[in-house]
């Protein structure tokens, strides 16, 4: 059975700091170095938490232009997982964010 690329927001883990009734679906992250409940997809982080993009199409455009770095490495995958103490850098704006324990962001 193949997992979908999204999950319903209402069924997302409680430690994700997202609005539950804003939209119906949220992007599922790719597997990586973090547990699924302790990480978020870059799409969710950039669109919902940082608010650097309005929709998924804009996040994909930012990622394909190599303007996103996770822990200093350029990523072009909008579903890449980012977890505890990872640093997300937006090279176009020059801003850096660190993910903290409750999956909220701190501007550094």
Image (tube, grey):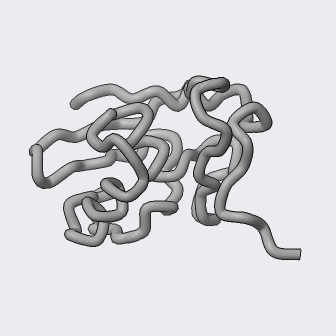
List the single residue furthest toward the right.
1
Identify which residue is drawn at 49% across, 62% down: 80
Residue in the picture at 33% in, 34% down: 50
In the image, 39: left or right of 13?
A: left
Q: Position of residue 102 (x, y in %)?
A: 56, 25
In the rendered image of this protein, does residue 102 appear above or below residue 84?
Answer: above
Count of marks, rendered view: 0
In the image, residue 92 lies at what x, y percent?
A: 11, 52
Give residue 58's quadrant in the image: bottom left
The correct choice, above or below, for 56 with respect to 13 in the image is: below
Q: In front here: 108 or 13? A: 13
Up-down relation of residue 30 to residue 17 (above or below)? below
Give the vertical position of 14 relative to 2 (above or below). above
Task: State the residue lying farthest toward the bottom.
Answer: 1
Instruction: Classify the position of the C terminus by image quarter.
Output: top left
Instruction: Give residue 20's position: percent from left, percent from top.
Output: 65, 25
Q: Left or right: where does residue 55 sit relative to residue 38?
A: left
Q: Quadrant of the N terminus?
A: bottom right
Quarter of the view holding residue 15:
top right
Horizontal arrangement in the rendering, residue 22 relative to residue 60 (left or right): right
Q: Residue at x 28, y 59 (%)?
A: 69
Splitting the image into 4 quarters, where does residue 91 fall?
bottom left
Camera-side residue: 38 or 29? 29
Point 67% across, 38% down: residue? 24
Is 62 displayed left or right of 79 in the figure?
Answer: left
Q: Position of residue 32 (x, y in %)?
A: 59, 64
């Amino acid at each position: 059975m193949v997992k979908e690329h999204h999950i319903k927001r209402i069924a997302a883990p409680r430690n994700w700091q997202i609005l539950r009734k804003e939209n119906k679906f949220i992007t599922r992250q790719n597997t990586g170095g973090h547990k699924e409940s302790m990480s978020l997809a870059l799409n969710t982080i950039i669109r919902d938490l940082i608010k650097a993009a309005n929709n998924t199409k804009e996040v994909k455009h930012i990622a394909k232009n190599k303007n996103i770095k996770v822990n200093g490495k350029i990523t072009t995958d909008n579903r890449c997982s980012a977890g505890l103490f990872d640093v997300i850098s937006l090279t176009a704006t020059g801003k850096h964010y660190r993910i903290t324990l409750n999956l909220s962001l701190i501007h550094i």
